[in-house]
Image (cartoon, grey):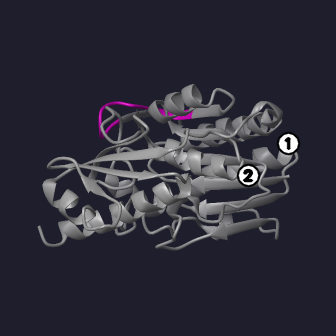
Amino acid sequence: MRLYISCDMEGTAGISSWKQCDPQDAYEYPVFRRYMTREVAAAIEGAREAGVRDVVVNDSHWSMRNLLFEELPRDAGVRVVSGAPKPWSMMQGLRTGVDAAFFTGYHAKAGDAATLSHTFSESIYSVAVNGTRCSEALLNAALAGTFGVPVVLVTGDSAIVDEVTQAMPWAVGVAVKEPIGFSAVNSLTPQAACEAIRDGAREAIGRIANARPFLFEAPYELAIETAGVEHADFIELLPGFERRGGRALRFTSKEYPELLQAFIAATRIAAAADSIA
């Protein structure tokens, strides 16, 4: 059985500040990258107890060089995709033939009243596909769905767990913390979070028979509202994007992978606006 894991960091137990997940921070980040890694390791352990042997882990946070390799299983059955930029960003390494996907350390979408809520970039105020406002989890789950891969586990704050399990009722959700606004949490301890994730991963693999891929219905319409007008100025330069207002843009496609790649490109070019604004 083959498993794909996309692991983010903001949804890790205890994290309530950007400093704790900023690779440039010399004090808190080293502690919390270890907690992130241990949550990933717990997910792998639970999955393996349920019969999984081959695992691909995509480090999906910030510089995408966060995981401590020595804290992960040391056998050839685990591969880690590390570094950035990656063409498919948080979903690099996904392929056909994978039986299921886990999303660990995920967080609420931009605009939600939840800790460190955002969607790919602080340049993005909101993003919707076919009228559905999306988190990173929904955007990424739909790409997995095009490969026929169901998302069966999500871990992170309660806001993202609620969103994913409502959209994908077959998925197991493990909420390791409750958000208290944007910069505070009520959290499990790291040890308790790992135990809950291990149990959730074991249960999630056991549910695979009832899982199904998450998909939006074609054709696809991407609607983006940027944080600032300057971000929309830059995104408008990309082929296929239509300016719909000061901060609003639209992109359409008959293929979901094309739409997601356009969104990834949009977030990257929008970041360039911050350097000259």
Magenta stretch contains residue 98? no
Which residue position is annotated with label 2?
44
Which residue position is annotated with label 1?
50
Left or right: 89 in relation to 75: left
- Residue at (47%, 62%) from the top-left corner? 261
Q: What is the quadrant of residue 183 in the picture?
A: top left
Q: Nearer the viewer, residue 52 or 274?
A: 274
- Residue at (85%, 45%) from the top-left corner? 49
Label 1, residues with CA under 10 Å away: few <14, some 14-19, many ≥20: some
Q: Nearer the viewer, residue 255 or 260?
A: 255
Reply above or below: 31 against 106: below
- x and y percent of residue 242 in the render? 27, 55
- x and y percent of residue 101 in the render? 68, 48
Q: Is residue 187 visible?
A: no
- Residue at (54%, 49%) from the top-left corner? 140
Inter-mark Cα distance, 1 to 2: 10 Å
Q: Amino acid at mark 2?
A: Ile
Reply above or below: 73 against 216: below
